[in-house]
Amino acid sequence: MNMKRLVFVFLATASIAQAAPKKVNLVIQTEPPQLDSSKATDQQSNFVLGHILEGLTRSGKNGEPLPGVAEKWEVNDKGATFYLRKDAKWSDGKPVTAKDFVFAWRLAVDPKNTSEYAFILYPVKNAEAIVKGKKKIEELGATAVNDTTLKVEFEKPCGYFLGLTSFTTYLPIREDFYKSRNGKYGADAKDLLANGPFTLTRWVHGASLTMEKNPNYWNAKTVKLDQIDIPYITPDNTAQFNFFKDKKVDMIERLGKDDLPLATKNGFKMKSYSDGSVFYMEFNFRKGRPTTNKNLRKAIQLVVNMDEYITKVVGIPGTLPGKTLIPVWVRGVKDRFRKEYPYNPPKMNIAEAKKFVEAAKKELGGSIPPLVWLTGDTNFAAREAEYFQNIFKTHLGLELKIDKQIFKQRLAKMTAGEFDIVAAGWGPDFADPMTFAELKTSWNENNRGEWKNDQYDKLIREAQSTSSVKKRMNAMAAAEKIMLDEVAIVPSYERTVIYIENDRLKGVVRKQIGADPDLTQATID
Amino acid sequence: MLSYVIKRLVAGLVTVFFIATATFLAMHLVPGDPISGAKAMSPEIRANIEARYGLDKPVAVQYVVFLTNMMKGDFGISFTQQNRSVNDIIAGHFPISATLGILAVLIAAMGGVLYGSIAALTRGKWEDRTVMFLVILGVSVPSFVFAALGQYVLTEINKRFDTEILPVGGWGTFSHMLLPALVLGLGTMAFLTRLMRSSLLEIVNQDYIRTAKAKGLPTRRIFFSHQLRNAILPVITFLGPAIAAITTGGFVVESVFAIPGLGRYFVQAVNQLDYTVIMGLTVFYGAFLVFMVILVDIIYGFVDPRISIAKGKA
């Protein structure tokens, strides 16, 4: 009798526990434009896709690859073999197979599919040739040996390939489902299949998204949240703040500078993390530009004090002054890259800077024309431009002409080279110094200043053609030293983000790579 | 009547055509294009995308293609939301903006007529002065300030009573609409109040009002049957474009209250140079505005018998 009662009490408590689902409410800036992983490029899409899909690997807290759909793998100079777990399932119960990866990757490089991120698959054999229309998509170096074995051939040795396998473009897509959507794959919740910790159950365009725990996920027992609800979509910082204050959302992913005093006043506990992006002044090396003069660039490098700049302009506590193109969080051989290969740019020295600017004047024929500072149309961009304008004028007698442009026009002007200095920045695609180092190669379209150095190019090519970690890191460190000694850029800061979350929310991981914030292991009391 | 309406509609179509052409030209003259992003693309990837959207063809050809498709009612696929058509976007989000806009105009019109009448009837007294002070405030303070302020006050009230008096944002029920509609309508309400007041004051000295007074009609009857009916005409003239402007210009309010209206898609499209969405929404908004103006002219005939559009004397 007692036993029966005990069982009853136990069952009753269990059902009560079940009745209160663990639910987190979020607000996001903009909605994902669409959720076809072969085409996604933006932060919001990466966030949602990172929760509903799982690649061969998952990226850990520091970007390290952890087993995902693949249980184990072998990687060498020629290629890699991935062994998929047998219990990985899609949300409709069918198994995730090696074919799903082959299909997704072929889709990404298919010229007809026009994926902007097709280049991220270039380490896979023939990918680039397929994008260029020179080879057939069936020739891509990825083969499903059987349902659970995926064989990948490399174009050339790729030391960071494993890190790529958790990237959005590398996520699996199932062919029969994709084709059944008639070109609408990823357009709505019903047009998506999940194999990750959550499924997208509702998507009202422009208004809300709801993700629910995926019972078919192979590792579902580790997923503690039942639901991630996004009832609000707005880019307005103040509105986001009000939603948090009104307890409608459990987290604000990114606080603006102006929200910090408000957050303090309301007693919200603020947290911070580095989002992995680095910002810098990029000089124009096109013919006829005054910034081709090294003495002028040296003068600019020596006249700025990035610590002061961060206090006066950036205003986010914890922001790191820029020192190199490769930010401090990136890993090298065994430790952080910057620890293993330290580089210290010269400190502010106004007297020296003045000497350099005089030398530059002589070389440029007596005077230096006003320099064009190309930047965006945000308040921050204006503050920053005016700060440097003042410093250049006061200490170096240099005129800075500020060219404020909206996003697309700024891009057009950057590409056309209509600037002397552009306020530039870069966010990483994968957890390897290469995601930054490749930027300044002469063949990279993002090298908007068109700085060109044969030695730099050679070293990066070297790093790209070996899988020896040590050799790769050495080459990239040597290349970076050349670039910084030449003052091709002047790093300004590494971004820190301040955010607030509900005290009851635990286990949220903020990351530089992949889905950020990562709520796959989070819980709420 | 019918021939007048047809004439106006044809003129409207021509207007829309010119709007479309001017927008098309302006859009292509602006540096930049819809497919460039923060991360530059390699030439081969770019070429593939350009070919997909027909951007590799000369602008003149693109224009002809656009016009042909427009005639068929097809505005194409959005560049940024790659598998949504512009028609889908309009169908999904215009009703939301329209609902909010109509509610805002209703609030504005009722408030404007009411406060304008109060001010006119109490001319020079403290009531009049208070209303006119609020009008200046309403006209000069932009809606984003009212939006942020309204939302802030609401969060404070909700906190004080520890319950949800009204939702601070989002969309779904009538209660979600109230505050945004009020905020959105405030500027128009202020303008209408001033318009109503001056219009009423102009009429007060008309002969027919004096006659009515001399006949010994009760003040209330004079006000409702003579003054109000005549004074409301300019308000109606203003309402047509106001509905169009409010329905299409609610971007800031939509953004603050996280409302999935069409406004944000338009602003986003302009920022992203999303050619198809810009063209689709401009033509749609243009047609909407033209239609509202025509509608107002027709309504005129019913409100004021002196205006007879049937005989083309309007």
Image: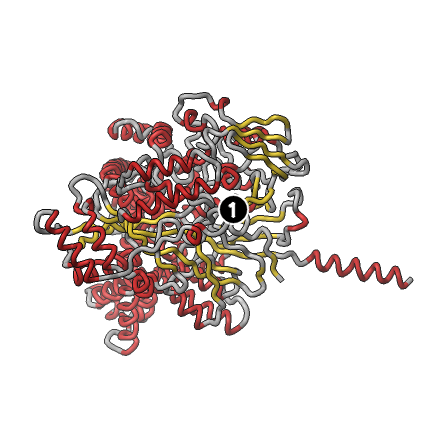
Task: Answer above or below: position of A153 versus A236.
Answer: above
> On what subunit does the disc labeled 1 rest?
A
Q: Which quadrant would the N terminus of chain B be assigned to in this image?
A: top left
Q: Position of residue B147 (x, y in %)?
A: 38, 62
Task: Answer above or below: position of B299 versus B162.
Answer: above
Q: Position of residue A482 (x, y in %)?
A: 31, 45
Q: Residue at x 29, y 57 (%)?
A: A346
Q: In the visual, does B184 lie left or right of A331?
A: left
Q: Position of residue A321 (x, y in %)?
A: 35, 59
* Nearest to the observer: residue A77 or residue A42: A77
Q: Residue at x 53, y 73 (%)?
A: B161
Q: Classify mark 1: helix, strand or loop.
A: helix
Q: Is residue B142 visible?
A: no
Q: Residues within 10 Å of mark 1 (few under 14, many from 20)?
A: many
* Nearest to the observer: residue B85 or residue A259: A259
User: Which residue sits furthest bottom?
Assistant: B126
* Nearest to the observer: residue B14 or residue A196: A196
Task: Please name the amino acid that badge 1 sits on.
Answer: Val
Q: Which residue is mark 1?
A: A48
How many badges with numbers are in the image? 1
Q: Quadrant of residue A292?
A: top left
Q: In the visual, does A323 lie left or right of A57?
A: left
Colouring style: secondary structure
User: Which residue sits furthest right?
Assistant: A1
Task: Answer above or below: position of A69 versus A227.
Answer: above
User: Which residue sits furthest left?
Assistant: A366
Q: Residue at x 40, y 23 (%)?
A: A133
Q: Position of residue A487 (x, y in %)?
A: 27, 49
Q: In the visual, does A246 lie left or right of A385?
A: right
* Nearest to the observer: residue A266 or residue A191: A266
Q: Is residue B82 visible?
A: yes
